Image: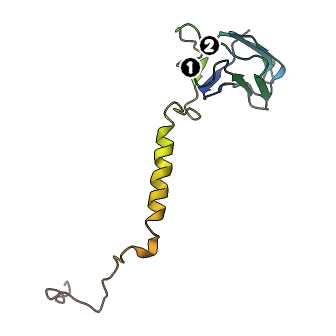
Amino acid sequence: MHPATAKWYDRRDYVFIEFCVEDSKDVEVNFEKSKFGFSCLGGTDHVKHSNEIDLFEAIDQNESKHRRTDRSVLCCLRKAESGKAWPRLTKEKAKLNWLSVDFNNWKDWEDDSDEENFDRFSEMMNSMGGEDELPDLDVADDESADSDDEKMPDLE
């Protein structure tokens, strides 16, 4: 048995774990209050994968779920305590070689005030007027010439 490669990311109410196993069969996901288990047969050679994680915090096992696709199995773990950030997935600080952070989906949701400030900034910019009020910077004509513009002699 080999552990499946997995990526995880944190949200306000959920923690997501994606197990990167193509063509998975016999998928079993076990949600417990402070522990999470995953197993399946994967690939064309039906390699048995098994992962077990002692979680950083408790989850609501009744509200947690998973979804299988042809390329992976995405598990959605409902946090027992919403709004609390998980600095890591595991209870222990030990590094698991099969587990990594999914930076493509990571979002620092703790400081949502930045989003509010951006929305206020966008609103303020929109209320200041449209593009048609900006000055036209392309005012130079070919007919208008500066006094120091003289015809250059041809190169020989």
Q: Nearer the viewer, residue 15 or 102?
A: 15
Q: In which image quadrant can residue 12 be found?
A: top right
Q: In this view, does 116 lie above or below 81?
A: below
Residue at image point 63% right, 19% down: 81
Residue, disc 2: 57
What amino acid type should be assigned to the residue bearing mark 1?
Trp
Whichever of callouts 2 and 1 sits on the residue coming sooner in the sequence is 2
Residue under the image location 84 percent in, 22 percent down: 25
Q: What element carries label 1?
A: loop
Q: Which element is circle 2 on?
A: loop
Question: Which mark is drawn over residue 40?
Answer: none
Q: Marks 2 and 1: CB-CB under 8 Å?
A: yes
Horizontal placement of 29 versus 95: left or right?
A: right
What type is the residue that disc 2 sits on? Glu
Q: Position of residue 121 (x, y in %)?
A: 45, 53
Residue 122, x across and y down, in percent: 48, 55
